[in-house]
């Protein structure tokens, strides 16, 4: 979702008519860690409640989420609550449809910086399939991701998104560390919230 930083992402909305920062009602935006929330709140000088919302999962859904995504191991250790970006008019609140993401690349959620890549349980980097259900569908679904349409292998795909494979892996390690911290900071008694009023309250939708 490096929408405004890389040529392919700048072309994507024009060519496909949409981008990964726009979502249908049944689609989800990136999962946030408390590190993302704090970084964005600091740099964008916005209260977390303006851009962050909860989604409550069942215990089973939370287990499945982590099992499918090794970088998120421990995210739901203390509560099955997913933090995600708030949406407005079918898109992330940070999307400017003419200019792309209004957050600087270093400020964006780490998951956005990795999109559409994800580390799979077998240790292989592949495509995120949450929106499409399978790698094949993520590759071939019309309008899914212009970078994926134009680059079929990991290295050229990473390059199209302005990264090397090593940078993708480093970003993955950053996410792993942020998730570990998220798990520590959401432990009972840790005294940390996402900065929102009622941040620990069960209030979102489930899926
Ligand atoms: S934070 Fe930026 S890159 Fe991530 S979904 Fe929102 S607009 Fe897109
Ligand atoms: S090319 Fe892919 S990663 Fe870039 S904006 Fe489009 S859907 Fe998002």
Image (cartoon, rainbow, N blue to C red):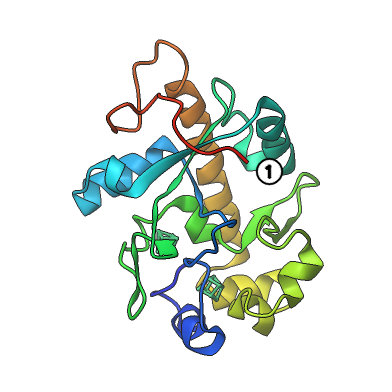
Percent across and percent down for residue 157 are 63, 74
The residue at which mark 1 appears reads as: 69
Percent across and percent down for residue 180 are 53, 30
Q: Residue at x 32, y 78 (%)?
A: 99
Apparent side of residue 35 relative to residue 117 in the rendered image (left or right): left
Residue 63 picture quarter: top right
Closer to us: 118 or 49: 49
Q: Is residue 165 above or below residue 130?
A: below
Percent across and percent down for residue 118 are 65, 55
Question: Does the closest atom of ligand 1 sit within 8 Å of the Cβ of label 1?
Answer: no
The residue furthest left is 45
Q: Residue at x 62, y 64 (%)?
A: 165
Residue 104 picture quarter: bottom left
Closer to us: 51 or 75: 51
Q: Is residue 154 above or below residue 98?
A: above
Q: Is residue 206 above or below residue 22?
A: above
Closer to us: 5 or 47: 47
Q: Secondary structure at mark 1?
A: loop
Residue 200, visible in the rendered structure:
yes
Taking the image in four quarters, ligand 1 sits in the one at bottom left
Residue 36, visible in the rendered structure:
no
The residue furthest bottom is 15
Closer to us: 55 or 2: 55
Quarter occupied by the C terminus: top right
Apparent side of residue 173 relative to residue 142 in the rendered image (left or right): left
Q: Residues within 10 Å of mark 1 (few under 14, many from 20)?
A: some
Q: Residue at x 51, y 74 (%)?
A: 19
Q: Is residue 30 above or below residue 94?
A: above
Percent across and percent down for residue 95 are 36, 67
């Amino acid at each position: 979702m490096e929408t405004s930083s890389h040529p392919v992402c700048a072309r994507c909305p024009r060519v496909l008519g949409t981008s990964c920062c726009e979502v249908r009602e049944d689609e989800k935006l990136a999962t946030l860690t408390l590190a993302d929330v704090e970084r964005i709140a600091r740099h964008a000088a916005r209260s977390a409640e303006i851009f962050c919302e909860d989604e409550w999962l069942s215990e089973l859904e939370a287990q499945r989420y982590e099992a499918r995504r090794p970088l998120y191991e421990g995210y739901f250790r203390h509560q099955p609550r997913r933090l995600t970006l708030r949406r407005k008019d079918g898109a992330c609140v940070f999307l400017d449809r003419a200019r792309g993401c209004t957050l600087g690349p270093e400020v964006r959620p780490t998951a956005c910086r990795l999109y559409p890549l994800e580390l799979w349980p077998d240790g292989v980097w592949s495509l995120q399939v949450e929106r499409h259900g399978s790698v094949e569908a993520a590759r071939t679904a019309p309008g899914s991701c212009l970078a994926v349409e134009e680059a079929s292998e990991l290295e050229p795909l990473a390059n199209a998104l302005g990264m090397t494979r090593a940078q993708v892996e480093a970003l993955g390690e950053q996410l792993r560390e942020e998730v570990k911290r998220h798990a520590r900071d959401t432990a009972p008694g840790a005294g940390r919230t996402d900065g929102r009023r009622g941040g620990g309250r069960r209030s979102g939708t489930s899926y």
